[in-house]
Image (cartoon, rainbow, N blue to C red):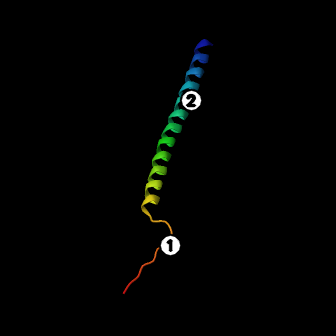
Amino acid sequence: MKTKFAASVLSALLYAQGLLGFAALATVLLKERARAEITASADVPSGPSVIVVR
């Protein structure tokens, strides 16, 4: 009985660790994506742009 309980506790802990690892990975990827979007939007000039061809 104690062996089954210990196995279920260990399984729950491993499952929780997997979820936390996935959340950490998603956070890092989303931060990098947001940083890339901010950098890309900073390169684009804001406001109206006029191109004059003569």
Q: Is residue 27 above or below residue 50?
A: above
- Labels 2 and 1 touching (C-beta < 8 A): no
Image quarter hosting the C terminus: bottom left
Q: Is residue 24 above or below residue 3?
A: below
Say which of 54 and 21 sits in front: 54
Between label 2 and label 1, give the one nearer the viewer.
Answer: 1
Say which of 25 and 10 sits in front: 25
| Label 2 crowd bin: few (<14), some (14–19), many (20+), radius 10 Å | few
Query: Residue 26, position in %: x, y?
Result: 51, 42
Image quarter hosting the N terminus: top right
Three-letter amino acid code at the position of disc 1: Pro
For image coordinates 47% across by 59% down, the residue present is: 41
Marker disc for residue 48: 1
Three-letter amino acid code at the position of disc 2: Ala
Query: Residue 16, position in %: x, y?
Result: 56, 29
| Label 1 crowd bin: few (<14), some (14–19), many (20+), radius 10 Å | few
Q: Secondary structure at mark 2?
A: helix
Query: Residue 45, position in %: x, y?
Result: 45, 65
Q: Tell me the distance, in whole angstroms, between the alpha carbons under discs 2 and 1.
A: 51 Å
Marker disc for residue 17: none
Seen in the image, is 13 located left or right of residue 33? right
Say which of 19 and 47 sits in front: 47
Q: Which residue is mark 2?
A: 16
Q: Extreme bottom residue here?
A: 54
